Image (spheres, rainbow, N blue to C red):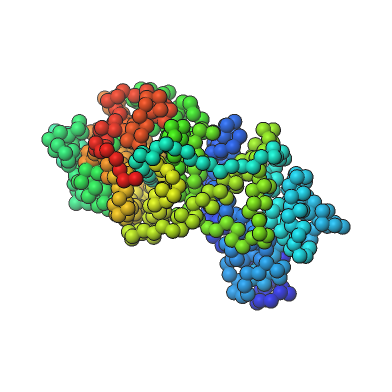
Amino acid sequence: TKIPDTLQGPPMHNDYQVKLWYIHEKIGQGPYEFPTVFSFFLPEYIPDNGPALAAKYISPETMILTMPNTVSLLNGMFSLIKYGLGDCNNGFSRYPGYSGCNDDGKYERSFGRLSYEPMGENLSQKIADLALLLTAGRLSGQNQATIEQTCGTEPNEASILRCAQQLIITTAEFHTTNRVERNGEDRSAETSVSDASNEPYKAIVYFYLGGGLDSYNMLVPYTCSPIDVYEKYRTVRGKNDLSEGIGLPKTRLLEITTNVGDPSNHLGQPCSSFGIHENLPTIKTLYDHRQVNFIANAGLLAKSVDVSNYNDETPVQLFAHNAMTMEAAREDLADKYSGTGVGGRMSDVFSQSGIPTNTFSINGQQILLTGEAGQGPSQFILSSSGLSDFNADPSIGDMNDVIMSLNNATTPDSGFFAETWSSKLSEAMMKQEQLKTEVDNTSVTAAFPDSGIGRQLQMVSRIMQTRQARGVKRDIFYVTDGGYDTHADVDINLVENFATIDAALNAFVSEMKTLNLWDSTTVVQFSEFARTLDPNTGDGSDHGWGGIHFMLGGSVNGGKVLGSYPDDFVQSPTNPIALSRGRMIPTHPWDAMWLGTAEWFGIKTQADLNKVLPMLKNFDPSLLYAESDLFVASETATA
C-alpha cells in the first residue's frame, strides 16, 4: 500500500499505521479476534455445496466463505482498488476526514492506495501481467479474454486497469490455487416448485448456547422426597461450613411444578417442583402457561450407556468442545450421512416431497443446516445486522453479470476448491439479490435488546416476514449465544448471560405473537455438553456431559420436566450414570426432543425419520418423546 503524500488531504505522519476497521466483522477473521479457542476454522469442516461436499473433502477455510463475508470481502476489495483504503462503499477502513468517494484515480478519500503498475506494451500484456501477479498465471485464457473485452471500453488506461483488477479478484483462480475449466453453462438459481399451497407454515429456531451450559444451575431441584435431591445438589456443588459453593439457594430460584397439567403426577422425577434460575423469568412464565418443556439429563448418545461401557459405545471425543458441538448438530455418530446436519436432512426430506424449505444461519456457516449434495437448497447465511449492498457503485454497468460469467459452471475435472469458491460466490450473489429487498421492507414492533442474541432473533423475525415472498412453507434458523464455557465464576457469568437471553427471548415471543406466528414456531435449545456439578477452585465448573435443555413455542404441550433428573450426583459402585466430579452420563439422547419436534414439523414416515435421525433406532421408545408428548393437538398454524 502506498501512502499518498502528494494527494489532497492532511499529511501522513511518520508513525502512521494502516487500520483495517473491524475487519473480522467484514471478512470473518482478523488479528486477535478468534471467536473461540479453536480459531476461525474447524479442522474437520466439509463445505456445504459443490464437489467437495460430494467427495467429503475437508476444507476448513470454507467455514468463513459465507454470504455476508463473501459480499463484504469483495466490497472491501472493490473499494480498495477504486478509492484507496478508506470507508467508501463498505471499505476496509474508516473515513479519513476529507473528500468524497470518486472512482477517478485520484484516491482523495483514502489513507493509501494500491500502487502496482503492470508491465506490457499493450492492454492485453498488462492484463496478463496483473493475472500473473494476482493468480500466479492460473487465470484461464477464457476469463482473461472476458476481462479484456469487458474493461477495454473504459475511457482511459487507468480506468481499464482498475476494472480489470476488480474482475480478477472475483475469480476462483485468485481465491484458490486451482486451475479452472469452464463447461460453458450458466449457473442457475435455486427454484422451489410446490403443490403444497395448503401446507401451513412452520419454523424451527435452533438456539445454541456455546461453550457448554452449566444447565444444573438453569433448572435446580426444589421440593424433593423421599430423597432430598436439593441438599444433594447443594453439597455436590460445594456447599460446606466455609462456603456456599456454586449451587443456588432457593431464594434465587423461580419455583415451577414438575407437571403443571397434573401436579400429582411427577413424571418419574425425584421432585414435585424445580427452580428456574432467577434471571429467566420469561422461561418461567411460558412454562407456567404450558409452552415450555425441559428434558433432564439429556445429551449426545449413539445408544444408551452406563459407566461400564460409555467409552467404547460412544464414538466421539467426549468433553471436547469442537467434537461435541459438531456432533450435536450432526446427530449422526455412525456417519451415515457424512457432512450433513439434522436441519439439513430435514430440509432435504421436505424438498424431495415438494414442500419448499429454506434454512438460515444468523451466525456463520453451520453443519446443522447442511444437507446431502443435490437433495435440497443450501443454507442462507446472514449477519445479525442484515444484508449489505453488493457492489453498490459498479465501475461498469453490467459488472455483476460479468462476475457471474467469470464464475460459471465448471467441468468435473476442474479444481474442486475453485468450484467451491465460484459456486459459493454465485450463490451469495443470487441469494443476496433475492433476499435483501424483502428483508429491508420488514420491521419489528417488539423492543429487541441490543445484544448479539437479541439482534439475531430480531433478524429471524424479519426473515419470517418474507416467507410468502420466498414461497416457502418451512424455515429452519440457527442462532447462538456464547460465553458458557464457565471454568471460572460460573455464577457471575450465568447471571449476566441468562439476563441477556431472557430479554431476547421475551422480545422474540412478543414479536411472534404480534405476527401471529407463535403457534407456528418452536425454539429448541442445545449446548455441546453440561458441566461438572463439583466446582473447581475458581468457582467455576468444567466440561461434563448430560444436562438439561428446553424447548418452547405456541404449540408446545408444555409445563413438564421430562427426561430423568438425577437423584444422585456422586460417583460410586451403585451409581450407573455418575462419573468423576459429578459428570453425568445422559439417560436420554438428543433424539428424545428431536423426534417429536421433527414429527410436528412434518417428518412423518419412518423412513424419513430414520434419515433425519439415523440413531433413533438405537434407543428404547420409552426414552423418546413423540409429537403427542411434546405438542398440543392443533390443525394448523398461521400461514
Quadrant assignment for the N terminus: bottom right
For image coordinates 30% across by 43% down, the residue present is 637
For image coordinates 61% across by 75% down, the residue present is 98
| Residue 614 seen in this snapshot | yes
Above/below status of 295 relative to 65:
above
In this figure, what is the number of numbered marks?
0
Q: Give coordinates of residue 603: x percent, y percent.
A: 37, 32
- Tell which of 99 and 374 is nearer to you: 374
79 relative position to 164: left or right: left
Q: Give coordinates of residue 319: x percent, y percent.
A: 42, 36
192 relative position to 72: left or right: left
- Tell which of 326 and 218 is nearer to you: 326
Asked which quadrant contains residue 606, the reply is top left
Above/below status of 62 relative to 88:
above
417 relative position to 241: left or right: right
218 relative position to 455: left or right: left
| Residue 570 seen in this snapshot | no
Q: Give coordinates of residue 390: x percent, y percent.
A: 57, 56
Q: Give coordinates of residue 557: x percent, y percent.
A: 24, 39
Q: Residue furthest left?
A: 264
Quadrant assignment for the C terminus: top left
- Tell which of 574 and 484 is nearer to you: 484
For image coordinates 36% across by 43% down, the residue present is 201
Above/below status of 538 relative to 337:
below
- Tell which of 545 and 389 is nearer to you: 389
For image coordinates 56% across by 38% down, the residue present is 49
